[in-house]
Amino acid sequence: MSNLQGKVAVVTGAASGIGRSIAVRLAMSGATVVVCDLNGEAAEATAGELPGSGSPRHGFAAVDVTDKDQVQATVRGIIGEYGVIDILCNNAGVSTMNRIENLTEKEWDFNFDVNAKGVFLFTQAVFPYMKARGRGKMINTASMAGKRATPLLAHYAASKWAVVGFTKSAAVEFAPFGVTVNCVCPGFVRTGMQDRELVWEAELRGMTPQEVKDEYVKLTPLGRIQEPEDVAKSVCFLASDEADFITGEALDVTGGAHLL
């Protein structure tokens, strides 16, 4: 496991799902973690359950990643309390599912506001502090859908393609200042979001949720549904010194599902 002792990490969307697993893994590796989430109570509970709550203790913040003022205030508060942000994990994400012909503007905006704009706002808020120190790690959660056609999720896929493009562009801009920017592209991950998507896809395709889930497994060469911890391990690696010379990468963490 990577050694992140003494590092301060900020993880958005960290009260549940992939974000929670990232927060746990970073904490297990020695980092002090600030759990950020729209649900402040859940963020506080998650922070209190993280391993290694020594000094400084893990923190939490209730923040809407789509609100620039909230994001800026949250980052200032973290800097005020911890002094630095060594690692930023832009993980907050949402999804809805629909055919393009029935897709609403509200659905489109919702996916882009959280999945893409949220990454931009937190990146923009944190970068000046990393730039001033001449080092930092940013890891964004994109998706397998950000690299290929994804029927019924065209708007979600488009927002994740945006994350991949933003990641690569930021990597080039930030490289002269010692800040690396990478993203991970998970596949079919067992989360509350996937549970909802199974129901939506089943209804749209005239299948049962279990049939859809079985199809996900068949589409994954390693033969199982991905766990949030599979993603967290890769994020922890990209946040570590072992990944110092990796930037602009969109790492497939899918069990091979992106190949089919």
Image (spheres, rainbow, N blue to C red):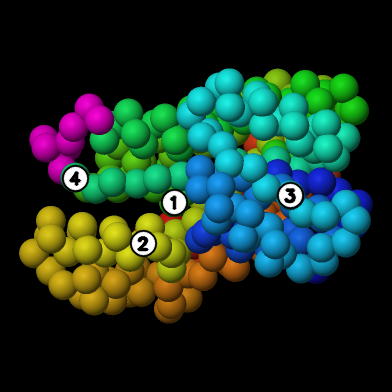
Front residue of 223 and 78: 78
Of badges 4 and 3, nearer the viewer stands: 3
Instruction: Tell me if 206 is positioned left or right of 75 in this view.
Output: left
Q: Determine the main secondary structure of the stretch shown in magenta.
A: helix
Location of mark 1 (residue): 144
- The answer to whether mark 3 and mark 2 are in CB contact below 8 A is no
- For the point 46% across and 49% down, the residue is 143
User: Spatial distance from mark 4 to mark 3, Cα to Cα?
Assistant: 37 Å
Can I make out residue 172 in this image? no
> Which mark is first along the chain, 1 or 4?
4
- Gap between marks 4 and 2 measured at Cα: 15 Å
Q: Which residue is mark 3?
A: 59
According to the picture, the residue beneath numbered tag 4 turns out to be 98
Q: Nearer the viewer, mark 4 or mark 1?
A: 4
Amino acid tagged 2? Gln
Badge 2 marks a residue whose secondary structure is: helix
Query: Does residue 14 sit above or below 218 in this rendering?
Result: above
Quarter holding the C terminus is: bottom left
Name the N-terminal-most of marks 4 and 2: 4
Magenta stretch: includes residue 102 = yes
Badge 4 element = loop
Residue type (three-letter) at the residue carrying disc 1: Met
Tell me if label 2 and label 1 are in contact, CB under 8 Å: no
From mark 4 to mark 1, how far is it between C-alphas? 18 Å
Q: Which labelled disc corresponds to residue 194?
A: 2
